[in-house]
Image (cartoon, rainbow, N blue to C red):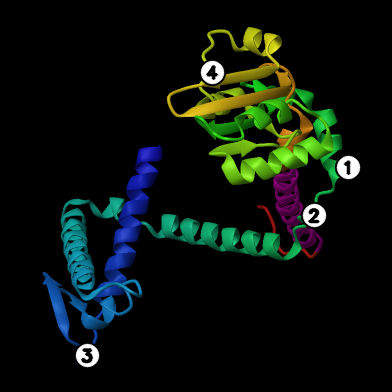
Amino acid sequence: MLVKNKTILLFLLISVFIFACSKNKNNEKKIARVFDQYLYESDINGIVPAGTNKKDSMQFVANYIDNWTRQQLIYKQADKNLPVELKNFEKQINDYKNSLVIYAYEKELIKQKLDTVVTDKEIASYYESNPNNFELKDNIVKVIYVKLPLNSSVMSKVRVLYKSDNPNDKQELTGLCQKYAANSSLEDDTWFFFTDLLKEIPIKTYNQEEYLSNHKYIEMQDSLYNYFVKINGFKIKESTSPLSMEKENIRNIIINKRKLKLIEDMHKDTYIKAQTNKDFEKY
């Protein structure tokens, strides 16, 4: 059924394209012909994207003409070989047009009337009511880390400061990282997927859960950098994802539910109003 629908849609699009590009235009320059159909100069006006250089513009137009020619030939071949009953697309065209009009109306309705403000209270309520929707698929960690070039002059300071919870020490560490670190992340409350952290820090482990349970401070080096990692917390896969990681996801879910409700209510109200006004009958 899907293949049949795609075939019908392709035929419809080719037909629309041919009709748009092949209508008779008096006193216009012809630039291509296939049988009794012509492509005119005005048909290609505005098809080249703004800012395209001359060489690319000429290639773009040549490709357009070639595609038009091929589509005309395919259409003629299909039109010649299909029996009449298989070329009657009036119902499909009407159905497709109706779908497009309805979609455009629903899109405009959403644009004008959808409430996109989602409060933290609504997000928290959805999170608490749907815990099974937020099962972690991977281990996550809450960490700070610093990536310093080998033999950095501030290595000994960083080694002390990254372990500290003192606000003054954190401020000093931030300043050092801005000036000397190849990369760093110093937000205490930011969650990372552990696999993403492994892309930045060359930790080698075959059992992530065991490793996280037994390491709070990690210091290591490779041929280019020294790494300092402080694990402030972790959650293993199949546990519940923290709310802070799910806020944007929940916001989108709530807004999408509002969209569906808005459209559903419009459909229902339209039907009830038409029923009340006797705008339709079923025989």
Asked whether 130 falls inside the magenta stretch, the response is no
Query: Along the polypeptide, which appears first: circle 2 or circle 4?
Result: 2
- At horizontal 22% and vertical 82% (from top left) the residue drawn is 41
- Identify which amino acid the numbered label 3 is placed on: Asn
Q: Which residue is tagged 2?
A: 117
Magenta range: 251-276
Query: Along the polypeptide, which appears first: circle 1 or circle 4?
Result: 1
Residue 215 visible in this rendered orientation of the protein: yes
Our reading of the magenta stretch's main secondary structure is: helix
Instruction: State the SS at label 1.
Output: helix
| Distance of label 2 from label 4 (alpha carbons) | 41 Å
Task: Single out the mark in the foreground, 2 or 4.
Answer: 4
Query: Along the polypeptide, which appears first: circle 2 or circle 3?
Result: 3
Q: Which residue is tagged 4?
A: 203
Query: Along the polypeptide, which appears first: circle 3 or circle 1?
Result: 3
Q: Do the residues labelled 2 and 1 touch (CB within 8 Å)?
A: no
Q: How crowded is mark 4: few (under 14 residues within 10 Å), some or many (20 or more)?
A: some
| Distance of label 2 from label 1 (alpha carbons) | 12 Å
| Distance of label 3 from label 1 (alpha carbons) | 66 Å
Q: Relative to 68, is 232 above or below?
A: above
Residue 219 in the image, given as x and y percentages of width and height: 60, 20
